[in-house]
Image (tube, rainbow, N blue to C red):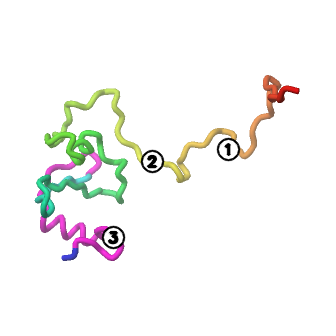
């Protein structure tokens, strides 16, 4: 099986086949993403780590604890019920930039902005 497609990265089908042949399942997060590990690449010592996303391929759905494991910030595999998660930590959200759900200031939503209130004076260069 070739390691790279003609487009320069593994295609979805190649990734699924590679995972079935070489991946060892490590765990699943609350979004249903599945994490794998495999033998290191030739000439390297670090094991491979990767994720198979449940919906599409949005890295925004990787929780912080799994992000740390994927990027070798820790070797401890996160538990299903993560006790290190704080009450104030929010779950990951998708990046909505460029979508209909993206934030827009009120003046851009309506197409016109309020008139100036008179508390602004334009700068004039010295004479």
In this rendering, which labeled residue sits more in front, label 2 or label 3?
A: 3
Q: Taking 66 as reference, is 44 above or below it?
A: below
Residues at circles 3 and 1 in contact by the CB criterion of under 8 Å:
no
Q: Is residue 16 magenta?
A: yes
- Residue 108: mark in rendering: 1
Tell me the element at label 3.
loop
User: Residue shown at 66%/39% (left/top)?
Assistant: 106
Q: Spatial distance from mark 2 to mark 1, Cα to Cα?
A: 19 Å
Q: Which residue is mark 2?
A: 95
Q: How many marks?
A: 3
Where residue 7 sits in the image (x, y, percent)? 36, 73
Q: Residue at left 63%, top 39%? A: 105
Residue 67 spot, x, y in % from top left: 27, 44
Give the extent of the magenta segment.
3-32
Of the pair 74 and 96, the residue shown nearer to us:
74
- The residue beneath circle 3 is 8
Callout 2: helix, strand or loop? loop
The quadrant in which the C terminus is found is top right
For residue 85, which quarter of the picture?
top left
- In space, the residues marked 3 and 1 are separated at their CA atoms by 39 Å
Q: Which residue is rendered at x = 28% and y = 68% of the image?
A: 10
The disc, 3 or 1, on the residue closer to the chain's N-terminal end is 3
Give residue 127's mark: none
């Amino acid at each position: 099986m070739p390691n790279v497609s003609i487009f320069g990265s593994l295609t979805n089908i190649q990734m699924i086949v590679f995972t079935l042949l070489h991946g060892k399942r490590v765990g699943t997060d609350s979004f249903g993403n599945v994490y794998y590990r495999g033998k290191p690449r030739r000439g390297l010592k670090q094991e491979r780590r990767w994720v198979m996303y449940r919906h599409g391929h949005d890295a925004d759905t990787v929780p912080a604890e799994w992000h740390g494991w994927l990027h070798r910030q820790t070797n401890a595999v996160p538990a299903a019920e993560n006790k290190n998660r704080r009450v104030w930590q929010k779950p990951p959200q998708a990046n909505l930039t460029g979508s209909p759900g993206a934030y827009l200031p009120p003046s851009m939503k309506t197409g016109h902005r309020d008139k100036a209130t008179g508390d602004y004076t334009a700068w004039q260069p010295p004479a």
